[in-house]
Amino acid sequence: KAGVTQTPRYLIKTRGQQVTLSCSPISGHRSVSWYQQTPGQGLQFLFEYFSETQRNKGNFPGRFSGRQFSNSRSEMNVSTLELGDSALYLCASSLGQGGFTDTQYFGPGTRLTVL
Amino acid sequence: KQEVTQIPAALSVPEGENLVLNCSFTDSAIYNLQWFRQDPGKGLTSLLLIQSSQREQTSGRLNASLDKSSGRSTLYIAASQPGDSATYLCAVRPGGFQKLVFGTGTRLLVSP
């Protein structure tokens, strides 16, 4: 079974631009979560989507948004990029049924650099 | 607010040693706890998941324990190998949804 895939793997943008990142979950997984990883703040939860609906959201500004499609693929968008948005963005997929053993599986990440 | 701390932040050991990584969390109301491994610049690989009702889980040379009441988990690595060198992260799932709260990580270096 194929793992979680993320595209692109690397991105370089300038301040003020916007960016869209894509995540394809493991087949059969309906939940996709996004995380931001920086050296200073570590791994922080952005949001989770399940069946095309945002189910949970972290403490990030409205510049960070996402969506999920009917095939469970998800995109994350960051508008008006700031230098502090430079990070590794990870997505994770799971069955999303809320069970105690529902494991999250992570993709390789997208490295975003904002100049 | 759930906070997760890992000690030590970094650890360097010679090959063959048994070692213990520590994770502590402030709120004992968790669904489960996962241990992950992250290689430099890469994504996270799930190592072990312990349900809130369980005390430990084992996979090969890895053993993870959970003491929910005291807010602690340990990851025991037996007979460490250079290939074990990576950053180890623990994460708790506070509730029914999929949000994970991560610790700060322990960077492990196993030298031949």
Image (cartoon, rainbow, N blue to C red):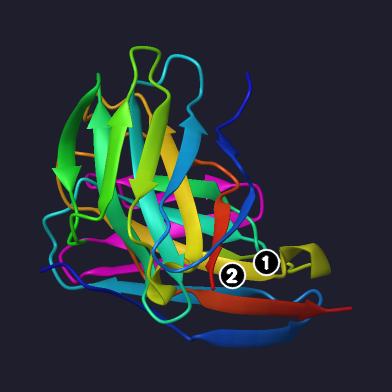
Which residue is rendered at x = 59% and y = 56% of the image?
B62
Q: Position of residue B27 (x, y in %)?
A: 12, 66
Q: Quadrant of the N terminus of chain B?
A: bottom left
Q: Main secondary structure of the magenta part?
A: strand
Left/right of residue A48 with respect to residue B76 in the rendered view: left
Whole-percent x and y of residue B61?
A: 66, 55
In-front residue for pair A90/A64: A64
Q: In the image, is residue A106 above or below residue B12?
A: above
Tell me the SS state at disc 1: loop
**Which residue is painted at 36% across and 33% down in the image?**
A32
Residue B25 on the magenta segment: no
Residue A100 visible, this orientation: no
Residue at 43% in and 75% down: A83
Q: Is residue B28 above or below residue A46?
A: below
Label placed on residue B87: 2
Is residue B55 highlighted in magenta? yes
Could you say whether the residue bearing mark 2 is in a helix, strand or loop?
strand
The 10 Å Cα crowd at callout 1, few under 14, some 14 to 19, many 20 or more, is few
Which image quarter holds the C terminus of chain B? bottom right
**The numbered mark 1 sits on a residue in which chain?**
B
Task: Using the rendered view, name the quadrant where residue A31 is placed.
Answer: top left
Residue visible at 39% across and 64% down in the picture: A16
Q: Are marks 1 and 2 in contact (CB under 8 Å)?
A: yes
What percent of the width, then of the height, locates residue A107?
Answer: 55, 42
Q: Does B89 appear above or below A90?
A: below
Q: Can you identify the residue that label 1 sits on? A: B40
In this orientation, does residue B47 appear?
yes
- Magenta part of the protein: which range? B50-75
Q: Residues within 10 Å of mark 2 (few under 14, many from 20)?
A: many
What is the CA distance from the residue labelled 1 to the residue labelled 2? 8 Å
Tell me the kind of residue under disc 2.
Thr
Residue kind at label 1, given as amino acid type? Pro
